């Protein structure tokens, strides 16, 4: 009788572990994805700040590319004119950071377009 009770407890614990393991794996994957998204948004905010602070769009694009390399992240930055009068001040540009897993997009009002 004692042996049967012991094996039932061991079976129960084994089944419990089999049920809990997928849940732990799922929540680990969700947490890693959320952390990755947060990191990408933080990096993209810095890229946007580079474009806002630089007077030359070409120089801002070069600095942003260098910043991404220094941070060790992949992806490409695309800048496009949205206002129609981009050589003028108060132009509106769209900045897109395309990565293999996601695309981040922002519209920025700035002073100079070249």
Image: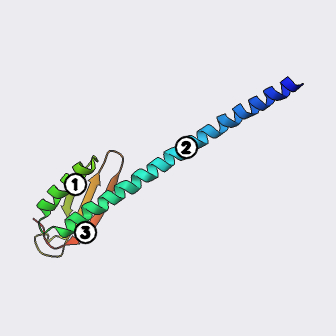
Q: Mark 2 points at which residue?
A: 26
The residue positioned 19% from the left and 69% from the top of the image is 53
Cα–Cα span, label 2 and label 3? 37 Å
- Image quarter of residue 47: bottom left
Q: Is mark 3 on a helix, strand or loop?
A: strand
Q: Measure the alpha-carbon separation of dots 1 and 2.
A: 33 Å
Q: Distance between the residues labelled 1 and 3?
A: 19 Å
Identified at 35% across, 58% down, the residue is: 41
The residue identified by callout 3 is 108
Residue 70 shows in this picture: yes
- Dot 1 or dot 3: first in sequence order is 1
Lower sequence index among marks 2 and 3: 2
- Position of the N terminus, as image quadrant, is top right
Quick check: 109 left or right of 3? left
Secondary element type, mark 2:
helix
Which quarter of the rendered picture does the C terminus lie within?
bottom left
Mark closer to the observer (1, 2): 1
Q: Where is residue 103 in the image (x, y as percent from the top left)?
A: 33, 53
Residue at the spot 21% in from the left edge and 69% down from the top edge:
52
From the viewer's perspective, tell me whether residue 94 is left or right of residue 62: right
* Residue wearing tag 1: 67
Q: Residue 42 appears at what percent x and percent y?
A: 34, 59
Inspect this view and state whether residue 82 appears: no
Local SS, label 1: helix
User: In the displayed image of the protein, which residue is found farthest to the front?
Assistant: 2
- Few, some or many C-alpha atoms within 10 Å of disc 1 (few <14, some 14-19, many ≥20)? some
């Amino acid at each position: 009788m004692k042996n049967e009770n012991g094996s039932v407890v061991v079976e129960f614990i084994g089944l419990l572990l089999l049920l809990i393991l997928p849940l732990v794996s799922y929540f680990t994957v969700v947490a890693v994805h959320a952390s990755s998204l947060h990191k990408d948004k933080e990096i993209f905010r810095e890229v946007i700040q580079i474009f806002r602070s630089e007077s030359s769009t070409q120089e801002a694009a070069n600095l942003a590319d260098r910043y991404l390399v220094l941070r060790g992240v992949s992806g490409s930055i695309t800048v496009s004119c949205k206002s129609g009068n981009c050589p003028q001040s108060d132009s509106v540009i769209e900045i897109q950071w395309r990565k293999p897993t996601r695309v981040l997009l922002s519209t920025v009002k700035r002073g100079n377009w070249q």
